Image (cartoon, rainbow, N blue to C red):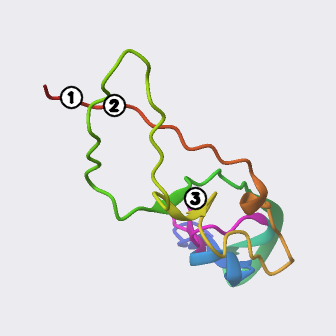
């Protein structure tokens, strides 16, 4: 009737996903913004379901939308260890250059982080099988 108050409530009643992929599971705020935080080195496809509702005068309707969140792998930097922070080499007498070798200069050489790509569905990007090249440059000289 005239003067009757109409109270309508609209919102998100739930978000479901596979929690393995996330340090902060997906959520949707009152403005409709989807927010989440993935685990380090986690990648693959995961399903997300968002359920919304509308209540009007005691009647509630809801709608669930499903989508796939595709978390893409990213090439991770290689690493290695070296006990040598300063390399000293005597000057080369004569006109011909001399090849200098230093045994065990680098160790624990890996093309990406250990444990990378161990997803719940067996995902593995094979980062450890990538070709790895070490290059060096002279950053300063003294005479």
Q: Given the current orientation, which residue lies at the most extreme left position?
A: 143
Q: Which one is earlier in the sequence, the residue at label 2 or at label 3? A: 3
Indicate which disc residue 141 carries.
Answer: 1
| Residue at 79% in and 64% down | 44
Q: Position of residue 37 (x, y in %)?
A: 54, 68
Task: For residue 31, say whether it is visible.
Answer: no
Picture coordinates of residue 41, whole percent (x, y): 63, 67
Residue at the disc numbered 2: 138
Q: CA distance from mark 1 to mark 3?
A: 58 Å
**Residue denoted by label 3:** 32
Q: Is residue 109 left or right of residue 62?
A: left
Choose mark 2 or mark 3, whichever is in front.
Answer: 2
Q: Nearer the viewer, residue 71 or 74?
A: 74
Range of residues picked out in magenta: 25-44
Question: Circles 2 and 3: CB distance less than 8 Å?
Answer: no
- Asked whether residue 84 is in view, the answer is yes
Q: In this view of the protein, which residue sits in the foreground, 37 or 81?
A: 81
Q: Secondary structure at mark 2?
A: loop
Q: Nearer the viewer, mark 1 or mark 3?
A: 1
Sort mark 3 into few (<14), some (14-19) or many (20+) by Cα contacts within 10 Å. Answer: few
How packed mark 2 is, by other alpha carbons closer than 10 Å (few <14, some 14-19, many 20 or more), is few
| CB under 8 Å between discs 2 and 1 | yes
Quadrant in which the N terminus appears: bottom right
Q: Quadrant of residue 10?
A: bottom right
């Amino acid at each position: 009737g005239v003067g009757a108050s109409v109270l309508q409530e609209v919102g998100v009643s739930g978000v479901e996903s596979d929690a393995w992929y996330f340090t902060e599971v997906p959520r949707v705020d009152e403005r409709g913004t989807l927010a989440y935080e993935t685990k380090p080195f986690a990648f693959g496809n995961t399903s997300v379901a968002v359920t919304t509702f509308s209540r009007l005068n005691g009647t509630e309707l809801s709608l669930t939308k499903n989508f796939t969140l595709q978390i893409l792998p990213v090439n991770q930097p290689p690493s290695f260890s070296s006990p040598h922070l300063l390399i000293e080499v005597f000057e080369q007498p004569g006109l011909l250059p001399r090849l200098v070798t230093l045994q065990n200069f680098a160790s624990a050489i890996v093309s990406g982080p250990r444990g990378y790509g161990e997803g719940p569905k067996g995902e593995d990007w094979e980062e450890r099988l990538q070709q790895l090249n070490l290059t060096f440059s002279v950053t300063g000289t003294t005479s």
